[in-house]
Image (cartoon, coloured by chain):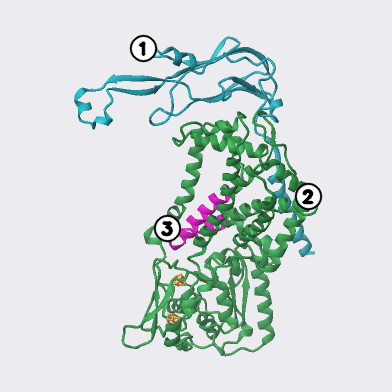
Chain colours: A green, B cyan
């Protein structure tokens, strides 16, 4: 149900912004953009912050009509936007089951990032030393006092017995500055297992995000709330519901319950990789290289979105290099199967050879005629595909589809082939959809051969709830094929030979050694 | 048109974020009042002296021999709080820390109905049965308060002890001057 809701939201945003700038697909990069905004605006605010007068110094910055006012507001709103973007990003990854196996490290470091975001936010709010800051600090102290850490309660610091010492604000400021360094490290770990990580959104989206933050900061500037006063009870607080949503309930609840809820939430986040991992018999196997077919062209090594493939010297006496998959890093996405012209690599049952066998069986079963358009897409798009009046050939991921599947369909008599893939930013296997487009239309290695008539082939990007995009693509391709009039004779499936040649290695063995 | 709607939706989204970012709310009941007690005190110590075993002393170098080995021991304190004659808190406080050598602290928050209340607080040592040297008994910090206080709506009244061991009352009106003396009607140190 959640997945269907997300698919509908994706479709709505695709319609408004186009898949390239769909903020839901770009949630991770938007979170990083927000971090950049936080860093830049934070440096400005730091210049004016005084630990000797925390509330006063922040109030003075907030009153600066030219810069401070909107810079502080942008800082605040960017921190909230970052949290929202992280929540969307985590939900996507969870619903797409991109949480276990080799991806577990990204999930766990993501959970750590969420924790660091919260810590960073809380220390930031405490810096302001208004009612919200005091409520946060006092509640944090109450929770800490339940642990056998200190010989007397930390809470005494927040009852009004004496003025807050500067050391407290110094330590808090230090933590607020040091935590972003930890965020940077965790982010580095977060993306360490993906090849070519994308950290920032496309420029128009980045610009739009910053411009909107600026506009909201101008229209709704954050004003200074009254200074913290420990002797005032029930003071209305300017609560940040993203970082402090738990505060009203926590203050009323017994400490053990709050700690229990915190530990349960943390535990749940941490065990997700194990909870979502399929049973061993249903777990997709890692990719394997069939060395006798491998020519050492390096294309799979270039294309693997998870850096799971390395090139190693051959040991079968043929000289040169051969691909080698590290099963611990492989997520079984199958992208390499689509990248290998001689069909020498891929997870068991999903290699180019397996795909060819499946498409032969499909042709025998469906016998498409000259006017038929065959829909080819991954089973995640089946929802979108099922509603259409056309034969459907499904593959586990369109990005892992070998181009000879398309060639085979056309040569076997299909009037056209409409490939339906998830929008590239939403490919469950990262770069699969991008490589697919380049293989079909831009000559990327393992390319669709020249002899295949490109006028009979189309590619549409459509998320699971974008049936209309598929319908439009289908109607357009049908019209185009009709306009072509004639068509080549269908070849007998048994007689179709697929050319398994690939280009020579991208770099020579000597060059590789220099790398 | 589509582009304009896109900008509008994004702006509304960020407006929602900004609204939830500073949402004024009361997380506490503003109509209640509270009597707070919070202070730290070194308290006082008595020495337990035992005649060291002769054999044990002989095992030590001559300059390290001490025929009267004494161990200072923190004296526990009793804390009583009565509000309008009702006993609201009674506790015996032992010096914290693994070796029981840290200063004593008092920390309590007692809800009270707003208005005037008679408040009596007693914080005094629980002497051991053995006789206590008179100078120790005379210098031990003691807090004994018996007074009538006004507890305003939505305010806490704090009773603390200053560095000299004298009681101090703090109410929100004094908040800007932490060094201010006792509030009007505050009890005197005994
Ligand atoms: S893509 Fe090239 S390097 Fe990779 S398995 Fe195929 S032939 Fe070998
Ligand atoms: S299936 Fe292939 S492309 Fe995908 S992670 Fe494994 S080795 Fe890389």
Q: Residue at x 43, y 79 (%)?
A: A353
**Callout 2: chain:** A
The residue to which callout 2 is attached is A64
Compare residues A77 and A91 and report the one nearer the observer: A77
Mark 3 and ligand 2: say if the CB distance to the nearest ligand atom is below 8 Å: no
Image x and y of residue A447, in percent: 53, 84
Q: Residue at x 57, y 49 (%)?
A: A174
Q: Is residue B115 left or right of residue B1?
A: left
Picture quadrant of residue B99: top left
The residue to which callout 1 is attached is B130
* Lower position in the chain sequence, tag 2 or tag 3: 2
Q: Is residue B180 magenta?
A: no
**Separation of residues labelled 1 and 3 (CA atoms):** 72 Å
The C terminus of chain B - image quarter? top right
Q: Is residue A106 magenta?
A: yes
The residue to which callout 3 is attached is A278
Whether A282 is drawn above or below A139: the answer is: below
Image x and y of residue A29, in percent: 61, 62
Image x and y of residue A464, in percent: 60, 63
SS at circle 2: loop
**Callout 3: chain:** A
């Amino acid at each position: 149900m959640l997945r269907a809701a997300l698919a509908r939201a994706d479709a709505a945003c695709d319609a408004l912004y186009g898949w390239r700038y769909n903020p839901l697909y770009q949630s991770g990069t938007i979170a990083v953009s927000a971090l950049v905004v936080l860093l830049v605006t934070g440096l400005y605010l730091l210049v004016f912050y005084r630990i000797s007068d925390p509330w006063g110094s922040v109030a003075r910055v907030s009153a600066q009509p030219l810069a401070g006012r909107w810079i502080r507001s942008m800082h605040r709103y960017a921190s909230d936007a970052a949290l929202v973007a992280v929540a969307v990003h985590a939900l996507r990854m969870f619903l797409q089951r991109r949480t276990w196996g080799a991806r577990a490290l990204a999930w766990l470091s993501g959970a750590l990032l969420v924790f660091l975001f919260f810590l960073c936010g809380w220390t930031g709010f405490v810096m302001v030393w208004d009612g919200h800051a005091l409520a946060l600090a006092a509640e944090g102290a109450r929770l800490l006092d339940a642990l056998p850490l200190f010989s007397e309660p930390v809470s005494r610091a927040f009852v009004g017995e004496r003025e807050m010492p500067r050391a407290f604000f110094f330590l808090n400021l230090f933590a607020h500055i040091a935590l972003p360094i930890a965020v940077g490290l965790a982010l580095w770990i977060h993306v360490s297992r993906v090849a070519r990580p994308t950290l920032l959104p496309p420029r128009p989206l980045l610009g739009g995000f910053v411009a909107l933050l600026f506009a909201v900061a101008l229209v709704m500037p954050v004003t200074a709330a009254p200074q913290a006063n420990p002797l005032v009870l029930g003071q209305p607080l300017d609560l940040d519901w993203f970082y402090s949503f738990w505060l009203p309930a926590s203050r009323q609840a017994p400490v053990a319950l709050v700690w229990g809820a915190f530990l349960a939430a943390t535990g749940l986040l941490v065990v997700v990789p194990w909870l979502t991992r399929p049973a061993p018999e249903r777990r997709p196997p890692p990719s394997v290289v069939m060395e006798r077919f491998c020519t050492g062209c390096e294309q799979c090594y270039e294309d693997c979105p998870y850096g799971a493939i390395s090139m190693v010297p051959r040991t079968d006496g043929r000289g040169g290099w051969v691909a080698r998959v590290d099963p611990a890093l492989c997520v079984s996405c199958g992208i390499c199967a689509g990248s290998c012209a001689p069909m020498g690599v891929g997870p068991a049952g999903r290699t180019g050879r397996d795909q060819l066998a499946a498409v032969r069986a499909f042709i025998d079963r469906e016998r498409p005629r000259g006017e038929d358009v065959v829909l080819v897409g991954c089973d995640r798009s089946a929802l979108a595909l099922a509603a259409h009046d056309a034969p459907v050939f499904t593959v586990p991921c369109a990005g892992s589809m070998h181009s000879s599947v398309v060639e085979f369909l056309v040569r076997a008599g299909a009037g056209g082939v409409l490939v339906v893939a998830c929008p590239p930013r939403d490919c469950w296997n990262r770069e699969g959809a991008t490589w697919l487009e380049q293989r079909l239309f831009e000559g990327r290695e393992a390319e669709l051969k020249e002899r295949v008539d490109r006028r009979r082939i189309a590619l549409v990007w459509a998320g699971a709830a974008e049936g209309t995009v598929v319908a439009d693509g289908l109607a357009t391709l049908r019209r185009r094929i009709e306009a072509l009039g004639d068509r080549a004779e269908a070849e007998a499936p048994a007689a179709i030979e697929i050319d398994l040649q690939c280009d020579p290695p991208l770099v020579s063995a000597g060059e590789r050694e220099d790398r | 048109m589509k582009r304009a709607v896109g900008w509008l939706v994004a702006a509304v989204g960020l407006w929602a974020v900004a609204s939830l970012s500073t949402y004024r709310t009361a997380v506490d009941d503003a109509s209640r009042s509270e009597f707070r007690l919070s202070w730290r005190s070194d308290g006082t110590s008595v020495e337990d002296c035992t005649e060291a075993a002769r054999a044990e002393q002989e095992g030590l170098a001559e300059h390290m021999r001490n025929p009267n080995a004494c161990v200072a021991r923190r004296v526990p304190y009793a804390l009583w709080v009565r509000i309008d004659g009702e006993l609201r808190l009674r506790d015996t406080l032992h010096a914290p820390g693994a070796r029981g050598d840290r200063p004593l602290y008092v920390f309590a928050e007692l809800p009270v109905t707003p208005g005037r209340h008679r408040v009596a607080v007693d914080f005094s040592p629980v002497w051991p049965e053995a006789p206590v040297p008179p100078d120790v008994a005379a210098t031990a910090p003691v807090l004994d308060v018996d007074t009538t206080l006004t507890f305003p709506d939505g305010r806490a009244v704090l009773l603390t002890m200053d560095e000299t061991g004298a009681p101090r009352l703090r109410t929100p009106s004094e908040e800007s001057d932490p060094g201010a003396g006792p509030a009007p009607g505050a009890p005197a140190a005994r």
